[in-house]
Image (cartoon, helix red, strand yellow):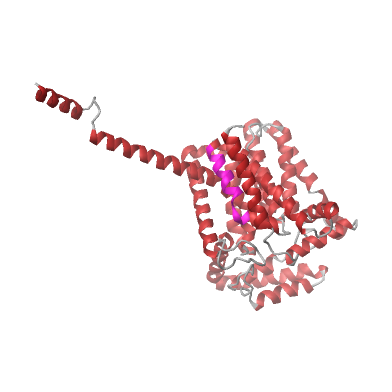
């Protein structure tokens, strides 16, 4: 094997050991959201068709049910090992995507950044949907980066299936996916015509609906309504709570406010048939209060943006290294976001208007703004931005390559100036004058 192949294998093994250490230091009890996912998984095992009225799609629970079926119910070791395998597969897909978009060197940097990213690696130890969601996001990027994507029917269908599985796992992608479908559809119809482009869009939607068929069928069977996502939710209740400054507890259970508990408990105590009216009540309260308190509302939303992107701990629930890991994690996160920004700006600077024709670039930028603008309305929990971290790693690799080339060229320029000052080139007037002085001296 070549030196590069050996390096790649050693990095992959290092990533495996890194994940084993972090995953098996995570909090063991299956509680809160993890317990909800696990309970739905056990319903699958009992032969039921579970559906959640108000909070979750069933994709991750179906995935858990498969692990439980093979290795035993709530076998945390098995879940962690499967998560680790999936996350390493994500790293390999990320490398191939970066290699296609940039260069082998940039791809290696992206790979290293992701393989040793503690934020995503730590979540392989928790019974939460982050690892699977990240894999599906990277798979979407991988499909978009293929050379024949623009006209390849199978790739469009595969993209639709993967997008459907992502929505089946994380319903928070609902609006984003449809907006991106629209962008892809308009672009392909503009480039290759209505008939050929329309067929590709139809294949994408067919794949998407196929992967979403469970949600469509079971929502209709249970509630009598066709829906891709839970029929009811607390969106107006949570948006209303943005009139208050509060932090969702992740590792410090002191950020909640009494109003949060009252609103959420009131919602869950309301029967299914009354949930729509409950949300409508808070919608009216929101619209009544907003004109007079919009400054407070926007200020709290801005704080939610900061909290969402801030990373000052490794694990949710219990972090054994907190608060000692607080500032190292925060500094690392700021550096990663900075490298991502350099990579994005570099792409814009080099390709200018052509970047608008690059699906991976559009996906990356659109998803960043989608998360930054819409997520703060409903959450300030920092783990909800982790699905974007493979994209941060992708563009950060390009950012690292750019900085290295910049420093290298700066060093070469400085070396050239030093060489020039010590011994001017023969073609310059200074060199000729020095040569003439030497000849006169010798004469």
Give residue 360's quadrant in the image: top right
- Looking at the picture, how far across and down is residue 324, in whole percent? 55, 66
Query: Residue drawn at (23%, 31%), measured in percent from left and top?
Result: 424
Count of all numbered marks drawn on residues in the image: 0
Give residue 5's quadrant in the image: top right
- Looking at the picture, how far across and down is residue 207, in whole percent? 77, 42
- Looking at the picture, how far across and down is residue 37, in whole percent? 78, 60
| Quadrant placement of the C terminus | top left
- Whether 32 is drawn above or below 9: the answer is below
Secondary structure, magenta segment, majority class: helix
Left or right: 191 in relation to 167: left
- Looking at the picture, tell me which residue is in the foreground, 424 or 151: 424
Q: Inspect this view and state whether residue 49 appears.
A: no
Q: Is residue 109 magenta?
A: yes
* Residue reaching furthest to the bottom: 258
Give residue 442's quadrant in the image: top left
Query: Residue drawn at (61%, 42%), measured in percent from left and top?
Result: 10
| Quadrant placement of the N terminus | top right
- Looking at the picture, tell me which residue is in the foreground, 346 or 404: 404
- Whether 251 is drawn above or below 224: the answer is below
Q: Is residue 49 magenta?
A: no
Left or right: 411 in relation to 20: left
The residue segment tinted magenta is: 105-120
Q: Inspect this view and state whether residue 244 appears.
A: yes
Query: Residue drawn at (63%, 71%), measured in percent from left and top?
Result: 241
* Residue reaching furthest to the right: 47
- Looking at the picture, how far across and down is residue 78, in whole percent? 77, 54
């Amino acid at each position: 094997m070549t030196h590069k192949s050996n390096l790649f294998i050693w990095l992959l093994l290092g990533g495996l050991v890194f994940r084993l250490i972090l995953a098996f230091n995570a909090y063991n009890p299956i509680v809160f959201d993890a317990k909800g996912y696990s309970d739905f998984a056990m319903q699958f095992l009992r032969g039921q068709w579970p559906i959640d009225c108000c909070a979750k799609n069933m994709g991750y629970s179906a995935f858990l049910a498969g692990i439980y079926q093979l290795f035993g119910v709530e076998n945390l070791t098995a879940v962690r090992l499967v998560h680790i395998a999936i996350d390493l597969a994500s790293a390999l897909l990320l490398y191939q995507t970066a290699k296609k978009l940039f260069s082998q060197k940039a791809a290696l940097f992206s790979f290293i950044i992701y393989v040793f990213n503690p934020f995503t690696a730590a979540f392989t130890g928790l019974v939460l949907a982050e690892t699977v969601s990240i894999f599906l996001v990277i798979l979407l990027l991988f499909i978009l980066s293929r050379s024949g994507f623009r006209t390849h029917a199978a790739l469009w269908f595969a993209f639709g299936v993967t997008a459907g599985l992502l929505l089946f796992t994380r319903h928070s992608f609902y609006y984003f996916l449809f907006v991106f479908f629209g962008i892809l559809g308009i672009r392909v119809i503009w480039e290759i015509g209505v008939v050929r482009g329309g067929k590709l869009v139809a294949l994408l939607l067919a794949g998407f609906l196929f992967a979403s068929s469970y949600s469509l069928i079971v929502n209709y069977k249970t509630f009598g309504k066709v829906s891709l996502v839970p029929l009811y939710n607390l969106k107006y209740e949570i948006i209303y709570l943005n009139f208050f400054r509060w932090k969702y507890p992740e590792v410090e259970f002191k950020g909640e406010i009494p109003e949060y508990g009252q609103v959420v408990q009131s919602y869950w105590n309301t029967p299914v048939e009354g949930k729509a009216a409950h949300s409508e009540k808070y919608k009216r309260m929101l619209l009544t209060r907003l004109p007079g308190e919009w400054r407070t509302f926007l200020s709290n939303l801005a704080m939610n943006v900061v909290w969402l992107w801030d990373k000052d701990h490794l694990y949710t629930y219990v972090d054994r290294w907190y608060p000692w890991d607080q500032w190292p994690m925060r500094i690392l996160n700021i550096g990663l976001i900075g490298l991502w920004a350099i990579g994005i700006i570099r792409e814009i600077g080099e390709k200018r208007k052509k970047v608008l024709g690059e699906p991976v670039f559009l996906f990356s930028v659109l998803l960043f703004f989608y998360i930054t603008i819409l997520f703060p309305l409903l959450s300030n929990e920092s783990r909800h931005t982790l699905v974007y971290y493979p994209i941060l790693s992708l563009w950060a690799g390009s950012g690292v390559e750019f900085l290295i080339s910049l420093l290298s060229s700066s060093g070469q320029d400085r070396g050239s100036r030093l060489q020039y000052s010590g011994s001017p080139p023969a073609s310059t007037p200074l060199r000729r004058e020095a040569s003439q002085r030497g000849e006169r001296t010798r004469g």
